[in-house]
Image (cartoon, helix red, strand yellow):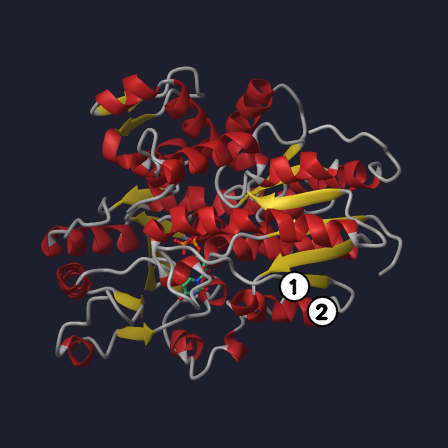
Amino acid sequence: MSTSIHLLIFPYPAHGHMLALLDLIHQLSLRDFAITILVTPKNLPILTPLLNSHPHIQTLLLPFPSHPSISPGVENVKELGNAGNFPVMSALVKLFDPITHWFHSHPNPPVAIISDFFLGWTLDLARHLNVIRIAFFSVSALLPSVFDYCWNHFDEVKSSGVVELHGLPRSPIFKQEHLPSVFRRYKESDPDSEFVKDCLLKNTLSWGCVFNSFVDLEGDYLDYLKTKIGHDRVFAVGPLSLLGIESKSANDPKLIPNDFSLKWLDGCPDGSVLYVCFGSQKPLRSEQMEALASGLEVSGVRFLWVVKTGEGYGSIPEGFEERVSDRGLIVKGWAPQVSILNHKAVGGFLSHCGWNSVLEVIVSGVMILGWPMEADQFVNARLLVEDMGVAVRVCEGADSVPDSTELGRMISKSMNQCGEVKARAKELKEKALAGVESGGSSARDLEKLAEELKNLQGKSVLIN
Ligand code: UDP
């Protein structure tokens, strides 16, 4: 290991959390930091492309700690769905002692821990080791302010059907059931819930916060957060998908077996295809699949629909694929989303509004047809529809079954009209691209972050 400034990076084992952090690691590695990534064995393959590009990056491979609600061998939220977050978060805290042991036996121990915002307990670890902790948010900058409001106005929020977040920019309003899942699942005095709440609160107490976001998307919310936490070490460095290594296991078409989605898109007119995908972990029930299939059929629009298969996932209605074969492609399993979104044939994205998908579609300049379901997706949809005007809502809720005629009508209208929304999506793309270019706001924040980290070496007392 070199004597460069050493950083320990601890991603959270869910695709939506990990991928953007890997892009950030790539950037830090280019800036000459010595990096160790903490990973459990089954998640190691996700790092392969990054490790191949940066052979100097080390891994700290620790076994996934056991938990009564997690079957042996399960190490990623992908296999558990959103409800798996509480047990996974609780299991990972058991790595406190093994990390401490590793740290004390290292010849050049890290000066900072950069960890996912679902690993807020690493602030205690960092304080114990006398290093700084930086929270990496694979979510919007609006989200921590929503959490902050919810915890601080707990009784009011829990007892209201509709919640207005006073004091936040533009005072966003949410239905109770659209608040982030982590908050909604919280049960007072339940140990897992209290632990998760504590973890989330520790993020803004950490030395710094890094967001996969950018000023032209969330400037007001970033400023609000800086004021709220009382310092400026809030870095918006996104969209990170523009800054990662080219070949990522999740997105590289060459690494996805038997994928012919891009070839199929080559044969479609520009802007004619609706891309449909609900992220890495959300199963649709059979009724939802039927309604969506029927909506796509009614719309008359070309589409590329990524259908996840496996336990808990509904199936594609019989005969559907054959009926729409002249204008629809169904990809079963995993699709190279970033490449698809950037294909000129794609003109719209029907999405659950997961944050990575949001940033990826912004970069492609395509309009979003939002179907927020859970987690932070309603918060993201609010940002896209009301604040930015780059999306329309076509359905809402994890269990909702849309009316297919209405859904078909909205799909058709969005793809064939909605010129203003499309124009704004294109403008936002330009702003996103400008942000990561030299001198842009995200590029500046990234340099500032690297600079601050370089200044840490040799400091005897590091304060979070
Ligand atoms: N993704 C992909 N192919 C798929 C499904 C998802 O490449 O078939 C990627 C997508 O590009 C994004 C991530 O997986 O980077 C999903 O993250 P997001 O935050 O959108 O949703 P989540 O899975 O966390 O709900």
Mark 1 and mark 2 residues within 8 Å of each other at the beta carbon = yes
Residue that appears at 62% across and 36% down: 123
Circle 1: element type? loop
Residue that appears at 53% across and 65% down: 43
Q: How many marks?
A: 2
On the image, the x and y values in percent for residue 336 come to 46, 69
Which of the two discs, 1 and 2, labels the residue nearer the N terminus? 2
Give the residue at the far bottom of this rendering.
258
- Label 2 amino acid? Ser
Residue 113 in the image: above or below residue 254: above
Q: Which residue is mark 2?
A: 53
Image side of residue 232 versus residue 104, left or right: left
Residue 229 in the image: above or below residue 210: above
Which numbered disc covers residue 74?
none
Q: Which residue is mark 1?
A: 245
**Rendering quadrant holding ligand 1:** bottom left
State the image quarter where residue 189 is shown. Answer: top left
On the image, the x and y values in percent for residue 208 come to 65, 33
Q: State the quadrant of the C terminus.
A: top right
Residue that appears at 58% across and 68% down: 44
Image side of residue 98 versus residue 154, left or right: right
Residue 369 in the image: above or below residue 464: below
On the image, the x and y values in percent for residue 46 come to 56, 67
Q: Is residue 419 visible?
A: yes
Spatial separation of the CA atoms under disc 1 and disc 2: 8 Å
On the image, the x and y values in percent for residue 90 come to 45, 46
- Label 1 amino acid? Ile
Circle 2: element type? helix
Q: Is residue 280 visible?
A: no
